[in-house]
Amino acid sequence: MSRVRMRRAGARIVAPSMVLAALVAGGLVAGPGAGQALADGSGGVQPPSPQGSASSNGSTYTSSIGGGNPDPASGTPWTPPACWMQPFFPQTETWKTGDPSGSVTDADSYYSWFVSQGASPTLPTAQMTSEFQDIQNRTAPAGWTGPATIDANDVWWAPDMLNSSTGFACAQGMAAANKLSNGYIGLEPPLKNGQQSPLLGAINVYVLSQIALAEITLPTVSVVTSPASTNETNAAVVNTPTYVAVKYKGDMDPSKIKSAGAFGLAPIWASVQATIASVSVSATGGVSSTTGFNDPGQTCATVDGKATSACSVTFSAPSGTGTPDKLQVSVTWKVTWSTSAGTGGTFPNTGSQQATKTVTVNEIQSQT
């Protein structure tokens, strides 16, 4: 879930050719800026590590993991790369009559759009358009540096970027570093299943897992008790179990899957799953015992909106006059990730959610 407002570069959203539809839907694809992206040794975009350290010039996204309020400090921050490489078009969408047009629907128009954003032309417009026309017809132009044999399964890769102060310059630098066949977009042979693109900054499963984490939304939580314990007439009773439950509003088992794959890009995906690790309870008044809390697999969830005997608290002393007790329940989440590359693990420090209820506790006086 993004805490930073992003916008898409409308001229570049070219469904169905846009491969990372998940990024578009999540609001992560956007327009120009300036900066430099990081890359690991394999050529993929370097993600924030599963241990939580990261550096990038991109904008910061914060998930609701670890907190149900809008305070970014309560969530899980992720700083995405300012730009990355991704496949945009198949070879069959290289050029069409009327190019370059105002909309980005093929490789020629993407190049034209990129130059219109401030990048220096790598060839005169007419010459570049002629080259794209040749490539559409599977004829290599003079000085061609792309695949030796142009095939319909080949794929046009180009930089995409975030709408940040670093995005566009990052994309320019990435295009130059990759020495793309046509300046700011390059034709590449198709990848085999499981193969990572050798291009610097190519999108990968690690980045997808971080995007998925940043979009997970936990349910909100509140405390329900039986008896209701809101006043003297429905108060909890000393030495008698008070049923305590958590009312979850939203998906109790939230998950996200992000994937990328088209035109010869071997499908890659990352899945992130949040599950309840434990539920604990505390109270300002005296508590002699509890049941259910901290038990493995126990969520202490309400049933039909009501508390049950699954989780309970037994108070050892009544509330003070005019000073009811505070009952707090904490829900700790475990967030795991897995990918098409066979990698995975558990994200650390995902935090917990707290919900508090004011309860009145009475003591029954014996009659003699």
Image: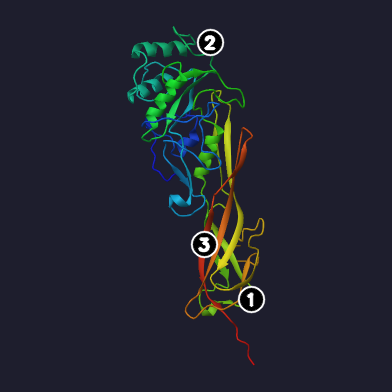
Determine the secondary structure under disc 1: loop
Residue 318, quarter of picture? bottom right
Q: Is residue 306 visible?
A: no
Q: CA distance from mark 2 to mark 3?
A: 63 Å
> Mark 1 — residue?
240
Which residue corresponds to the image point at 63% horizontal and 62% vertical from the top-left? Answer: 293
Residue 162, quarter of picture? top left
Residue furthest toward the top?
Answer: 142
Determine the secondary structure under disc 3: strand
> Mark 3 — residue?
355
Q: Position of residue 184 (x, y in %)?
A: 41, 21
Vertical relation: 132 (above or below) 3 = above
Q: Are marks 2 and 1 in contact (CB under 8 Å)?
A: no
Q: Earlier in the sequence, mark 2 or mark 3?
A: 2
Tell which of 155 and 68 is nearer to you: 68
Total number of numbered discs in the rendering: 3
